[in-house]
Image (spheres, rainbow, N blue to C red):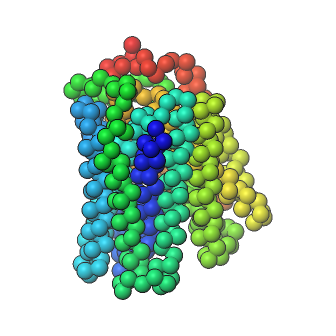
């Protein structure tokens, strides 16, 4: 079992390592070095979100129906590697920048799609008594991968290690290689994809019927509502945190990287701590507690008058980020019908992508109306609504998820 956990976690370590370096450095190369407009750069993510909307449930349904999640995990992983490699190659060969942006966008799409088939594997390598701990280990590996990606990049960007090409592009090469090397052990594994309680594959059912099955169950309905709300808040907060830090607390740019590393390290620790607690106190209770904690923490970070208080608040933000997504993944696996696992995680992926719309919109409105402090404070509103949804979930959680069939409630 320990070998399975290591291989599963290694995959998350590897794909986060390559993703963070592309997100930080290749985006800079596209926009700053090559003059790609902000609109076209963000269009690469919009393309990926729209594609996920259609592809995640479609391929998730096929994986459940034919029991071939391994096939689609392999295809999405190799798709990510191939198109990231094409993005690097087209940049090195001085192709028009539009090609590099296109390859980058397709690579990001495959990166997001891979989690539809990766996340359900948590159910294969864990039991109800240790699922939270192992989910936390997976997210800890993810955050450690991000840290390693940044540490690998530093000597290349600074010129200490030279490849004879643009340092920004050079930093991507070893990370892409490490990504596929770290992913291969999971892709070639056989035992991880086999369950002892292999569920009966679903018959051919329309997407409309599957959605009706999932959302007619009030437990799953309130889970996805809460997930959408807190993902909106957390994703928007993360995407704007460095800007908020500079604008409100006037922290120099050269200290931002240190603050980011501290936050990621806290997130890694939080994923493990809250995952362990979820095994002891049940995931739904721990997630409710985490969401409650977000409200005063966001308020403190928004209104703090001292750098010390903001710094402490930032550490707690990191802990809560790690715990939020670690425990929510564990809880969904506990709630979802086993023979709809991939399809449901397709909906999970769509909800995560949808969180890039409402949160930024509310942030922008609050920013225009009252400045950065009000923009940050507005994210607490999402968390309050998420807490209400989780309370609703707790009221219905006496229903056993094992009684939900692929064709409705039994």
- Picture coordinates of residue 177, whole percent (x, y): 35, 66
Which image quadrant for residue 205? top left
| Rendering coords of residue 197 (x, y %) | 37, 24
Q: Is residue 31 visible?
A: no
Q: Is residue 19 above or below residue 98?
A: above
* Between 281 and 409, the one nearer to me in the picture: 281
Quarter of the picture holding the C terminus: top left
Residue 141, above or below 152: above
In-front residue for pair 162/313: 162
Q: Nearer the viewer, residue 232 or 203?
A: 203
Q: Residue at x 38, y 77 (%)?
A: 170
The residue positioned 58% from the left and 58% from the top of the image is 264
The residue at the point 25 percent across, 43 percent down is 71
Q: Is residue 287 above or below residue 45?
A: above
Q: Nearer the viewer, residue 116 or 390?
A: 116
Q: Determine the residue positioned at 72% across, 61% down.
A: 310
Whether residue 144 sits left or right of residue 47 in the image: it is right
Number of on-image labels: 0
Quarter-of-image position of residue 242: bottom right
């Amino acid at each position: 079992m320990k070998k399975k956990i290591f291989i599963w976690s290694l995959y998350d370590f590897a794909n986060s390592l390559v993703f963070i370096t592309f997100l930080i450095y290749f985006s800079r190369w596209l926009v700053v070095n090559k003059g790609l407009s902000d609109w076209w750069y963000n269009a690469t993510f919009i393309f990926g979100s729209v594609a996920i909307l259609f592809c995640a449930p479609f391929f998730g349904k096929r994986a459940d129906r034919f029991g071939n999640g391994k096939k689609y995990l392999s295809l999405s992983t190799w798709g990510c590697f191939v198109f990231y490699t094409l993005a690097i190659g087209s940049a090195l060969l001085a192709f028009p920048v539009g090609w590099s942006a296109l390859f980058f966008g397709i690579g990001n799409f495959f990166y997001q799609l891979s989690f539809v088939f990766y996340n359900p594997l948590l159910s294969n390598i864990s039991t109800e008594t240790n699922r939270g701990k192992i989910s936390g280990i997976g997210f800890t590996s993810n955050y450690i991968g991000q840290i390693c990606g940044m540490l690998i990049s530093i000597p290349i960007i600074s010129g200490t290690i030279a490849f004879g090409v643009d340092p920004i592009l050079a930093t991507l090469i070893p990370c892409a290689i490490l990504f596929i090397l770290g992913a291969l052990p999971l892709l070639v594994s056989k035992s991880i994809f086999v369950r002892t309680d292999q569920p009966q594959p679903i018959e051919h059912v329309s997407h409309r019927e599957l959605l009706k099955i999932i959302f007619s169950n009030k437990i799953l309905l309130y889970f996805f509502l809460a997930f959408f709300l807190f993902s909106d808040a957390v994703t928007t907060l993360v995407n704007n945190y460095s800007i908020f830090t500079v604008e409100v607390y006037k922290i120099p740019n050269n200290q931002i990287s240190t603050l980011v590393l501290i936050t990621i390290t806290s997130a890694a620790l939080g994923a493990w701590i809250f995952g362990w607690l979820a095994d002891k106190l049940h995931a739904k209770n721990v997630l409710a507690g985490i969401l409650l904690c977000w409200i005063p923490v966001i308020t403190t970070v928004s209104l703090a008058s001292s750098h010390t208080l903001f710094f402490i608040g930032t550490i707690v933000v990191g802990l809560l980020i790690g715990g939020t997504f670690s425990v929510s993944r564990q809880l969904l696996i506990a709630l979802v019908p086993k023979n709809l696992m991939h399809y449901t995680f397709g909906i999970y992926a769509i909800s995560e992508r949808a969180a890039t719309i409402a949160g930024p919109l509310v942030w922008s409105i609050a920013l225009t109306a009252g400045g950065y402090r009000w923009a940050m404070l507005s994210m607490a509103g999402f968390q309050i609504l998420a807490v209400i949804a989780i309370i609703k979930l707790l009221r219905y959680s006496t229903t056993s998820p094992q009684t939900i069939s692929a064709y409705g409630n039994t």
